[in-house]
Amino acid sequence: MSVTKTKIGVIGLGSISDLHLQSYHRSEEAELYAACDMNGGRAEEKAAKYGIPHVYTDYKELLANPDIEAVSICTWNNSHAEISIAALRAGKHVLVEKPLCRTVEEALQVQAAVRETGKKLMVGFVRRYDSNAQLVKRFIDQEELGEVYYAKASCIRRLGNPGGWFADPDRSGGGPVIDIGVHVIDLCWYMMGRPKPVSISANTYKKLGNRANVRNLSFYKAADYDPTVNGVEDMANALIRFDNGASLFVDVSFTLHAKKDEISVKLYGDKGGVELEPEVSFVTEKHDTILNMTPQTDAKSLNVHEAFYNEIQHFLSCVRSDNQPISPVADGLEMMKMLCGIYESAAKGTEIKL
Ligand SMILES: NC(=O)c1ccc[n+]([C@@H]2O[C@H](COP(=O)([O-])OP(=O)(O)OC[C@H]3O[C@@H](n4cnc5c(N)ncnc54)[C@H](O)[C@@H]3O)[C@@H](O)[C@H]2O)c1
């Protein structure tokens, strides 16, 4: 029996769009139906690669196509809110890349549009959809760690300012905090049970520039890489306090004089701890002995292709049923409060209350 496929439009066809396109292409429940990028050559090229019949350079024209049921938004952060709202009002379900947008005000407008239209919006917090993350979540939900009261996350790039729009605060909303900090902060916060953030003390530093002079070391670049513009921070650290007494410490960088790149995501509870990155592993105590327990899994850390596929499959299941996304607009809004709070605290040089 053939399954009716959901007709999908993908808006923004730069670097990350490939992971959306590959996942929809692989899914039996989706049909890649339309593609849009304001760069017409890029739109044609991606459409040809994935056999997509309808190609646009203006997202409004794509949204006017009544056959499209759902869209992925993979554009620069400055258009996430505008395109999400327009898509919802055009009757489409939305999967929007992280971060939801650039400011809390924009996030509130997107949330209002979700309420007004009744359409589904899912934020692409892709790390939540990794199978190790879901494994850890099951353990935490079953109280294996007890009360999780501290989390610590680090995402350090020695060299990795993607340039172009990422380095232009008007289009990105900020640097490593909003681009990569969002992933690890969200993962910790999700695992901690989404407590309400109440205060933030943070620092941002802009000391090294983008170091476009460095040779022999490659890094992730925007599709339109341009090293001549750089208005964002190099690195940041922050301590976020929650209403249940728990706290999260995070540091992130686009560039730092560090020996190597580093990603770590660690959570500590009163019955046990867990490291999700760099390798999934639990810590507990039994019979007066501290145990390190390593689950047997296909991958030790994030499997990015699988995580994107799981994210897209979850989006499709929500679009095709009454299921609500596990990364809804409300979580995108809370994350914007934390990200913008980090910038506000750093700018004021003091702790801020949320
Ligand atoms: N989930 C992840 O792990 C992950 C990784 C990288 C990037 N991202 C997010 O994905 C988004 C895109 O990042 P990228 O690295 O692909 O950037 P990119 O610059 O490589 O691609 C963005 C594309 O969007 C197009 N575009 C921008 N504004 C548009 C508009 N209004 N209408 C039509 N096209 C428009 C650009 O021409 C470009 O081709 C960002 O929000 C970024 O934060 C997520």
Image (spheres, rainbow, N blue to C red):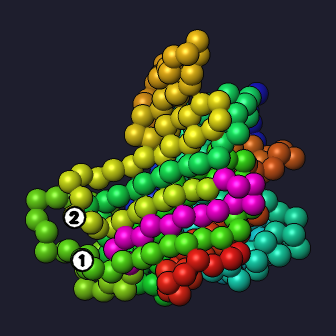
Q: Say whether mark 1 is within 8 Å of ligand 1.
A: no
Q: Which residue is mark 2?
A: 257
Q: For the point 55% across and 16% down, which residue is it?
A: 288
Q: Secondary structure at mark 2?
A: loop
Q: Which residues are magenta?
A: 233-246
Image quadrant in which the N terminus is located: top right
Residue farthest toward the left in the current orientation of the protein: 215
- Relative to 172, residue 3 above or below: above
Q: Nearer the viewer, residue 164 or 187?
A: 187
| Residue 269 drawn at (x, y percent) | 63, 38
Quarter of the view holding residue 175: bottom left
| Mark 2 crowdedness (10 Å alpha carbons): few <14, some 14-19, many ≥20 | few
Membership of 329 in magenta stretch? no
In the image: residue 200, left or right of residue 108: left
**Residue 260 appears in the figure:** yes
Q: For the point 70% across and 33% down, which residue is it?
A: 146
| Residue 107 drawn at (x, y percent) | 70, 75
- Relative to 18, residue 116 above or below: below
**CA separation in Å, label 2 and label 1:** 9 Å
Q: For the point 35% across and 58% down, which residue is it?
A: 156
| Residue 209 drawn at (x, y percent) | 26, 79
Q: Earlier in the sequence, mark 2 or mark 1?
A: 1
Q: Nearer the viewer, residue 32 or 146?
A: 146
Image quadrant in which the C terminus is located: bottom right
Give the residue type that dot 2 points to. His
Disc 2 vs disc 1: Cβ atoms closer than 8 Å?
A: yes
- Relative to 191, residue 77 above or below: below
In the image: residue 278, left or right of residue 160: right
Quarter of the view holding residue 110: bottom right
- Relative to 154, residue 271 above or below: above
Q: Which residue is mark 1?
A: 208
Q: Nearer the viewer, residue 184 or 228?
A: 184
